[in-house]
Amino acid sequence: MGNSINLVTELPGPRSKAVLERKSKVVSDALDIHVPAVIDRGEGAHVTDIDGNTMLDFSGGLGCQLVGYSHPKVVEAVREQAGRVSHTDFSVIPYEPYVELAERLIAATGGGDRKAAFFNAGAEAVENAVKFAKAATGRPAVVCFEGGFHGRTLLTMSLTSRYKPYKAGFGPFAPEVYRLPYAYPYRSVHPDQAAQFALEGIERAFATTVDPTSVACAIVEPIQGEGGFVVPPAEFLQGLSKICRQHGILVVADEIQTGCGRTGSFLASDTFGFQPDIVLLAKAVAAGYPLSAVIGPREVMDAPGPSAIGGTYVGNPVACAAGNAVMRIIEEEGLIQRAEALGKTLTARWEEIAAETPEIGEVRGVGAMVGVEFVKDRGTKEPNEEFLGAVIGGAMKRGLITVSCGAYHNVLRHLIPLVITDEELDEGLDVLADVVAAARKGGGRTDTLEPEGE
């Protein structure tokens, strides 16, 4: 076992407990807490709370900390830009960091005659991508996919598949949104035909449910994130692209969780030979500073006309400075290649654990984006949310932060900072191996999982 994790109190420690008590009195309960500790600082792949407990974070700020917490080059860029100018609306007084980042992202996503626009968050990128597509096509409808997650605003909540906790009680939803099948091989009756069945479902929907000539765009995650780290066959994404182009439908790749190198290429789309019209980035693109991007063909991006797109804070200069620093770090530190290496280690170790754990139904992923699906029985594939809950709870007691995903809350997802050291990775995986074994021994009950001694 490594020595990055250092727990000096139980979680929460006394100082964290006091802040969390204050939180309960003044912060909406809808913002519930996953980790019972209050962060003081973060560095690389680990965080330290206000009680002095140091933990490894395999959630990476829900995918934002791809280059690690407080990377010195990001900190320097933010400090320098904040000292010059921290805010002005780009459409009132433009600034160079915005233009520089647009140039960098266009080059990283394939180049060509394309343009970019920046916003505050992933949901805003989705909303505006739909606006660009509608303006360019003159069409009102949008199609999305089963299992997809695209945000929590009215339109993006309508596009998001899972109703609990994201949609329940929040309707009515945006009109002219149609949901189509997504290829999920593990949960297909015939895994080797998952792509074919999904594509047939799309063709059927265009014949019976929605007129394809009314559809502006199809928005899809090349690998589903919140939906369960579902990796579709390449033929599904390529087939979807072919169908859409036959009908003049723009294809939007939501790379908000997959992009910026996590999958071993800058875009996950590249892994599948999938060429979307519009690409969306957020999360890791600015190391957690509020920034998202829409990148598409010139004729699409110029279609809305002057002042039709924008916002007071979108493309904030400090966030753009952070984004430029992130792009330099990815290139200078070889993080795309690092994602490949991390993915091989993650997959190999989980396959070892799975060999002795029948509750693991599948280990899947591309690059460092690896998910582990837990089931009650490998034959029936009945989801096992309780077992995963025991694993996540046990890991947290041992100082490792992990998160789940999936329609059934039964998939462990890894959003590890790509700057994690080999020693830290092994330490975290040792914790996970231990808590999986403990969960089996305890029948999947979280109350049987106690932290290891010092």
Image: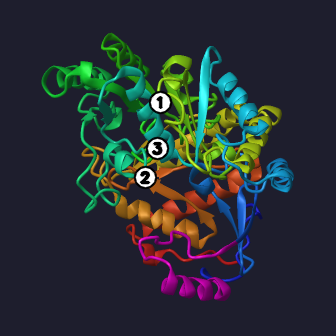
Q: Amino acid at mark 2?
A: Cys
Q: Amino acid at mark 3?
A: Gly
Q: Secondary structure at mark 1?
A: strand
Q: CA distance from mark 1 to mark 2?
A: 20 Å
Q: Which mark is residue 225?
A: 3
Camera-near label (1 vs 3) is 1
Q: Is residue 355 visible?
A: no
Left or right of 88? Residue 74 is: right
The outermost residue toward the left is: 208
Camera-near label (1 vs 2) is 1
Q: Amino acid at mark 1?
A: Ala
Q: Judge whether residue 15 is colored magenta.
A: yes
Which of the two labelled residues, at mark 1 and mark 2, occupies the earlier sequence position?
Answer: 1
User: Colour mode?
Assistant: rainbow
User: Which residue, given by chain and number where applicable, does mark 2 sit on?
Assistant: 405
Which of the two residues, 2 or 114, is positioned nearer the viewer here?
114
User: Which residue, given by chain and number where applicable, does mark 1 sit on?
Assistant: 253
Quarter occupied by residue 396: bottom right
